[in-house]
Structures are given as C-alpha cells and as structure tokens.
C-alpha cells in the first residue's frame, strides 16, 4: 500500500462529504466511518507502507515515506480526528457538510506533512495545513470577527513559514538537494540557516513565545475545530518537525539551547496565562501552548523520545478537554468558566473532564503522567537548574488543570433547562476518555523500548526523587487551587485589576509586538513610501517632464521639416500643372484645331470638284489611274 494512501483516503472522504449537504442523515455516519477507515489505512501504511519518490528533474522531486515518528502520526492524526468528527456531526453546527469536509481535508494535509521526506513535500503539506486551518477557524464567516481571527492565525503562522522556505533554500544551496538527509551534512553557514529556519517555523506553528497569542484567535472556530487543531494536527506540526530534524541539527552549538529557552519560556508564561484566564477555551489554548513548550524543552534537552510521548498523550487528553469545554459553553451559553460549575448538572461530561484534567496535571497511573515524568527526567539530566524549572512548569500545569476542572465541572447548583449533550457528543467523550485511560500502559516495562523505537530517540532513566518531586509539585498545584477556591478567588484570578488583564492578554505579548514590531514596521513603511514619493517618484516625474519637453521640441522640428517638404512638393506640383496647361493649350489644342482647319479646307476643295459635268469626272478618273500606274511602276 502506497504511503499516499492515507492522504488520498482522507481527501476522498472530504469530496464525498461535500456532496452530502442535502442528505444530513448520512453526514455523520459517513464522516465517522470514513475517518475510522482513514485511521486503519494509516495503521496499515505505518506497519508496511514503503516510501516513494516522485522526480521531475535531476535535483527536484518529492520523497515521501512512513519513517520514524511519522509512523506514529499516521495513526494518531485520524484516530484523534474520528471522535472529534463524531462530536461535530452531533453538535448541529451550521454548514455541517462544509465543516466536516474541511476537517477531512485538514487531516489529509496533515497526513501528507508527516510523510514528507524532503523540504518540497514538507512545504506542500505545511502550506495545505495552514490554508485548511484558516478555513476551519473562519467557518462562521458571516461573523466578520471570525474571519479576522482566522486571518490573524494564518498570517502569524505564515511569518514562521518563511523560516521553512529559508531552510529549504539553504539545504539546496549546500547539497544540491532538498532531501532531509542533507541537513546533517550541510556545511556552515548553511547548516546554521537551516537550524534558524526550522526553529522559527516550529515555534510559530506550535504557538511558542513570541507567537503564542495566535492561539486565542484560533478559538473563534467551532469547538471540534479547536479540539482538532490543538491535539494532533496544526499545533503539533511544529513539535513534530523538531522531533524529526533536531537530531540532524544538534551539531549547531546554539540550536538545542535555543529550543530549550523557547520551550521553557512558553511553558511558564503559558501556564501563568492558563492559571488566570476567565475564558474556558482560552484556558485550554494557553495550556496547549505550555504543553508544547514542555515538548520543546524535551527536544532541547536531547530527548525526542520524551517529546514524542508527550505529544501523543497530550493529543488524546487535550481533544477530550476541548470537547468538554464545548459542551459546557453550549449548555450555559457563555464562555466564562466561572459561570459553569456543571458537575451535578452534567455528570457524564464532568467525569470525562475529570479524566482529561487529571491527565493534564500528570496524575499517575495515567499515561500523561509517564510522559511528563520523562520530560522532567530529560530536563534534570540536562542540568539541575533546568530540572528545577521543569518542575515549576509542572506545578503550574497542576494548578491550571485543577482550576479548569473545579470551575468547569466542580460541584455546583443543579441547573435546569440546560442544553443536554447529544448521544454522538457523549460517545466522542467516552472514546477519548477511554483512550486517555488506556495510555496507562506506558507505565509497563516494555513501553520504554516501544517509545524509543517509535520516536528514534532515547529516554533518560528517572530516579525516585524525581518522581517524588513531580508528585510534590502536583500536590502543591492542587492545594493552591483548593485554597483559592475556598477564598472565592479562583474564578476571577489571583491578580486584580490591570495585572489580571495583562496576564489574560498573554503577558502583554500582543501589545509588545505592536510596539516593537507592528508600529516600527508600519512607520518604516510610511517613511519608505514618503521617500519613494519624494526621491524615486520625483526623479521619475522630472524625467517625464524632460521627456515631454524634448518631445514638444522634436514635434515642432518635425512639423517644420514635414511642412517644408509638403510645401515644396505642392509648389512643384503646381508648376508642373501650369506647364502642362500651357503645353495642352499650345500643342494638344493647336494640333486639334489645325487638323480641324485642314479637314475644313480639304472638304471645301473637294466640294469644288463636284461640278456635275461628266467629262470632269472622266479626267479625274484618268488622273487617278495614271497615279496608280506611277505608283506601281515605282514599287517595282
């Protein structure tokens, strides 16, 4: 089975769903069954699928294959998408056929991305993922704010995409090929350019500092879109890229430390935002950024295996949490998390949210706790200070996970008249909750070897004190949540007034970007525009005036020269006409008139011969005969 089979299967599903708009009863079953089929095709390709090469020249071509962690992603992406699609089919969103069709196309693009074996095929998948995510975020296009939010998310990630183009160009300049194999053998400075470009692209796609705020814009999309974007698709693309290419770029001295710094800064800042934000879905968005920060931290610490394990466990429980948040928003009609408290009103979603929040916090024996401990172990092995900061990030994780659970589905008054979740929505929650629990198999001894083989990396051996420290951080985080809840501060956040607003706005990053980037760039653009008007355009206008003056002078000279020729020609023509007139009068008319007079004289003389006397006629006849005889004689 070809490695393109999963992408083609998802694309075929997208085309089929787009034609079922008039048959709503078929949409859900076809979408769920089709996506489950895509997952099975992905599993078959991951186990047996050979790679392919499509070449159209000596240096250009596409290389696709199921290699390394890409095999895991081939199964993970459609497997997560299946319950999310089921939730979407049961949610009754407007334009459901279009939504499901774009979700399938989005999965197809992501599957193409994770099978890429060179920068050309990677860029194709990368751009298709960005384009389809824009369409999904802006699904409710009748509301202009949704379109603006989709555009913001798209343009922010597009800025990072420039790094991937630079990396592709540098690899080609160094090796004459776009293949990933050329990354490790590229010489300086091309290898450094590749490293910088890959880091820029990965940080933008995975919403790392300073690109993190675009995740808030992405919350404008429907709940299933948010669940899909934040779990195993768009946001995971950056972390996947680093897991795939970081080992080849580890020789660049600053590369791994830079990844570590970006990831650590995002894990801490994202955790602070998630711990204080009042918007339910944005709490989860900030936690997504923070969790991917931990994956970056693991890659920077040299453990792509820990990062890969964290990506898988995060994909499952984060999709679950987003769906529970969507149910809460639909039930209450508000995104304000402090107004939910639906534990008694919606017990089934509350149980699912509890499983997801415990996994997010890293509570054993859930698999997410194992992957988080692997990240902490990698950080500790890289240095004590880094390990301490990773534990601080873990404490924040426990705090915002506990805060979400208590405010969203903690004990509250039993409410009536709430919108109850549909059976398809509950089935999606059940499937993801079961998968979250099933990942507890990672605690079994064989899991270590399986994870290392699947990711192509190594795991650091944890110690007892690391486990104890992680559990202590977990307990401290939950204790803070309980204390704040008892004091009534949990719903409004611990920071009052302007400080809370600053934290809610991602520590002022949008304002900082406006002041440091947007305004300077806009000012520079205006200055360049004025310089263009005053210098470049002034020169052009001066050249135009000179050209007009020269053309006027030339036109006058041409007019004078042509007029002289015309007048001379006219004079010659008139002189010739006068000469012809005189010749006509003197010669032609004179000849005609002379001939006429001669004819008249001949006629007059001939009339004199007409006497009527016979002997005269005989004399004339005799003279004629004599004349003829004379002529004949002379002719002889």
Image (tube, grey):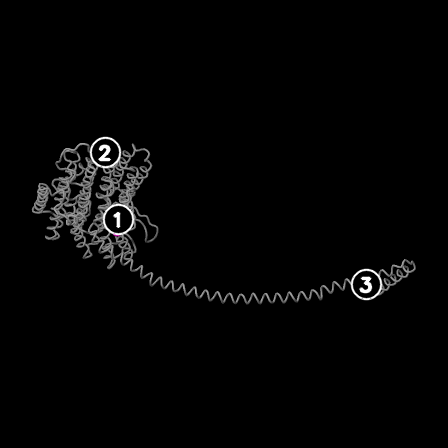
Q: Nearer the viewer, residue 497 or 265?
A: 497
Task: Looking at the image, tell me whether mark 2 or mark 1 is earlier in sequence order.
Answer: 1
CB atoms of marks 2 and 1 within 8 Å: no
Query: Which contiguous range is marked in magenta?
Result: 150-160
**Is residue 74 shown above or below 516?**
above
Helix or strand or loop: what does disc 3 sit on? helix
> Residue 135's spot in the image, x, y percent?
29, 44
Q: Tell me if residue 339 can be seen.
A: yes
What distance separates the C-alpha of mark 1 from that of mark 3? 115 Å
Residue position for label 3: 601
Marks 3, 2: nearer the viewer:
3
Q: Residues within 10 Å of mark 1 (few under 14, many from 20)?
A: some
Judging by the rendered image, the residue that carries numbered circle 2 is 424
The question of residue 156 being in magenta is answered with yes
Instruction: Say which residue label 1 marks.
Output: 152
Q: Give the quarter of the image for residue 16.
A: top left
Tell me the crowding category of disc 3: few under 14, some 14 to 19, or many 20 or more residues within 10 angstroms, Cα based. few
From mark 2 to mark 1, how far is it between C-alphas?
Answer: 32 Å
């Amino acid at each position: 089975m070809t490695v393109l089979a999963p992408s083609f299967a998802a694309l075929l599903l997208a085309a089929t769903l787009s034609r079922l708009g008039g048959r709503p009863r078929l949409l859900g079953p076809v979408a769920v069954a089709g996506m489950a089929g895509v997952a099975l095709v992905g599993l078959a390709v991951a186990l047996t699928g050979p790679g392919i090469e499509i070449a159209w020249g000596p240096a250009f071509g596409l290389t696709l294959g199921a290699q390394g962690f890409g095999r895991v992603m081939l199964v993970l992406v459609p497997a997560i998408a299946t319950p999310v699609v089921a939730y979407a089919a049961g949610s009754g969103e407007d334009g459901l056929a279009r939504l499901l069709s774009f979700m399938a196309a989005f999965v197809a693009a992501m599957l193409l991305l994770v099978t890429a074996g060179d920068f050309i095929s990677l860029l194709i998948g990368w751009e298709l993922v960005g384009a389809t995510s824009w369409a999904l975020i802006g699904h409710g296009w009748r509301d202009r704010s949704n379109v603006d939010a989709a555009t913001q998310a798209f343009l922010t990630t597009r800025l990072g995409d420039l790094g991937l183009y630079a990396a592709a160009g540098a690899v080609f300049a160094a090796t004459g090929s776009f293949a990933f194999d050329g990354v490790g053998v590229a010489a300086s400075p091309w290898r450094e350019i590749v490293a910088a470009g890959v880091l820029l692209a990965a940080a933008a796609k995975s919403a790392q500092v300073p690109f993190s705020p675009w995740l808030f814009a992405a919350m404008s999309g429907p709940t299933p879109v948010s669940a899909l974007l934040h779990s195993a698709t768009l946001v995971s693309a950056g972390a996947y890229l680093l897991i795939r290419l970081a080992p080849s770029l580890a020789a660049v001295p600053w590369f791994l430390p830079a990844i570590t710094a970006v990831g650590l800064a995002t894990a801490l800042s994202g955790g602070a935002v998630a711990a204080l934000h009042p918007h339910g879905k944005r709490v989860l968005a900030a936690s997504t950024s923070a969790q991917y920060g931990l994956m970056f931290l693991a890659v920077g610490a040299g453990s792509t295996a820990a990062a890969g394990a964290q990506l898988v466990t995060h994909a499952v429980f984060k999709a679950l949490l987003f769906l529970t948040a969507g149910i809460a928003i639909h039930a209450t009609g508000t995104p304000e998390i402090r107004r939910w408290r639906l534990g008694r009103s919606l017990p089934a979603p509350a149980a699912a949210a509890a499983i997801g929040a415990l996994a997010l916090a890293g509570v054993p024996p859930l698999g997410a706790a194992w992957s988080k401990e692997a990240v902490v172990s990698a950080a500790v092995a890289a240095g004590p200070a880094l390990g301490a900061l990773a534990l601080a990030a873990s404490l924040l994780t426990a705090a915002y996970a506990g805060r979400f659970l208590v405010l969203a589905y903690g004990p509250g008054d039993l409410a009536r008249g709430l919108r109850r979740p549909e059976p398809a929505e509950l089935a999606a929650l059940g499937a993801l909750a079961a998968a979250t629990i099933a990942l507890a198999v990672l605690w079994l001894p064989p899991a270590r070897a399986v994870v290392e083989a699947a990711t192509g990396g190594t795991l650091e051996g944890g110690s007892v004190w690391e486990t104890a420290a992680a559990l202590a951080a977990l307990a401290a985080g939950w204790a803070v949540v309980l204390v704040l809840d008892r004091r009534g501060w949990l719903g409004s956040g611990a920071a009052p007034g302007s400080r809370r607003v600053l934290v809610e706005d991602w520590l002022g990053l949008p304002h900082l970007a406006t002041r440091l980037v947007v305004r300077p760039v806009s000012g520079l653009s205006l200055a360049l525009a004025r310089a263009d008007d005053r210098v470049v355009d002034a020169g052009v206008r001066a050249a135009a005036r000179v050209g007009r003056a020269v053309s006027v002078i030339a036109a006058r000279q041409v007019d004078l020269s042509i007029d002289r020729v015309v007048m001379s020609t006219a004079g010659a023509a008139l002189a010739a006409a006068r000469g012809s007139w005189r010749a006509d009068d003197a010669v032609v008319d004179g000849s005609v008139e002379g001939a006429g007079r001669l004819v008249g004289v001949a006629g007059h003389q001939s009339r004199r011969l007409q006497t009527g006397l016979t002997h005269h006629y005989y004399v004339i006849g005799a003279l004629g005969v004599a004349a003829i005889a004379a002529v004949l004689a002379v002719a002889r």
